[in-house]
Amino acid sequence: MGYTMQAGVYIPEYMKNYYANITLNNSRLLDYVVSEYNWWNTLTLPEVVQLYAKENDTAIASSLIMYGSFTPPWCNTWDPSGATSNCMDIKSELTIWDTGILHQMIVNLNISATVSYWGPLGMRQYAFAKASQQRPFIFKSIYIPEDFLGPTHPLARVTFHPYTQECYLNNTASLMGYGSVNCDFRSQNPRKIGRTDMLETFRDSAFYDFSLLMRRFELDEATIDRLWVASNTTYSDEYETACEFLKANYTLWTGWIENTYVEPSYVTFEMSTAKATAVYVLSGLGLGLIATVFALLLIYRKHPMIQGMSMNYSILCLLGLALTIGSASLFMDSDPNKHVCSAQLWIPTMGLNIALSALGAKTWRIYRIFTSATPIDPMMLTDSYLLRIAA
């Protein structure tokens, strides 16, 4: 979540000549290398990687002891002969100086580079051998002794961008030298790596208390120092150490947490027997009344009054009302399956549409008969004509 120091890569000044030789009229290389000497960008160019990956340092490496190496997943293990190397190799003294710094920069920025470690004395011998042969050489060192390469071999330094207190700035967009989370000391807070939709949850969400912890959790430098001191104890493992630290710093973390979440209660819809009986009785009475009216329409269908009120649309109106009233029984099921749920949605809707459409067509028919400027024969308003009105 933070870094304790800044990493740099040192490149001998005489390597400019090698860079100039690989420009090959390439405007990109010309701008990066010859015009600006932008060494950081240069390290990401395929042509430069190819140059340093295929160097044959077998003679130099055979006389020295390699103390360790770092290889990112996309690189082959460094080969002193350059035969199988697909990444350039950065020479360094000790692994403990680079862990989490240079390594993380290589991984975060996807640099095609490995690191080999030769110890302080081995690094000095390596550097002298390369300088005496006037060959390009990339290495990293915490400090550069005055006589490291001699007075005739000045150095050019490549540094990563300095760390800042700002979060995410130029991190995922350009990755120009920033760490994976560009929020470092003075304080550490998990919100640097939290997703927005997780940190800004609603109060009734199960993640709300966790989002509060993510936003409130913060360790300043003084607390981090105390944590380092606490870790240098005789506890059996890191879990016991962390547990004892939390016990000893109760007031530190109690303000970070809340336990406000209440699990929602689920109520199962159930209709009492008395209410269900009442619904069935009323629905039955309604359907019985509709059946009675329907029977009367059939019995007196020859009557002039019935013929004048559009028999077919009267029946459609009754059908729609029957569907609507009859659908009440569908809602009595306390554990409906998907078919019943679909019927609860569609049958009442279809019933009301049929009834209201038929009633609307009949009303419009009466309106045309009695309000038209010229008399209209009711027989001219046929069912097919009214169907278009209802549609």
Image (cartoon, rainbow, N blue to C red):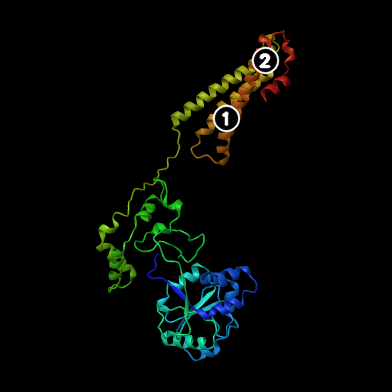
Q: Quadrant of residue 58?
A: bottom right
Percent x, y for residue 10?
47, 77
Left/right of residue 239 with respect to residue 299 in the rendered view: left
Percent x, y for residue 363?
63, 16
Q: Residue 16, relative to residue 302: is it above or below?
A: below
**Residue at the image position 51 percent from the left and 36 percent from the top:** 333
- Mark 1 closeness class: few <14, some 14–19, many ≥20 residues within 10 Å: many
- Say whether marks 2 and 1 touch (CB < 8 Å): no
C-alpha span from label 2 to label 1: 26 Å
Name the residue nearer the viewer: 202 or 369: 202
Q: Residue 291, relative to residue 135: is it above or below?
A: above
Q: Is residue 85 visible?
A: no
Q: Residue 350, relative to residue 218: is it above or below?
A: above
- In the rendered image, which quarter contains the N terminus? bottom left
- Does label 2 or label 1 sit earlier along the sequence? 1
Q: Quadrant of residue 191?
A: bottom left
Q: Which mark is residue 348?
A: 1
Q: Amino acid at mark 1?
A: Pro
Q: Quadrant of residue 78?
A: bottom right
- In the rendered image, which quarter contains the C terminus? top right
**Residue at the image position 60 percent from the left and 27 percent from the top:** 351
Q: Is residue 341 visible?
A: yes
Question: Which residue carries the number 2 mark?
Answer: 365
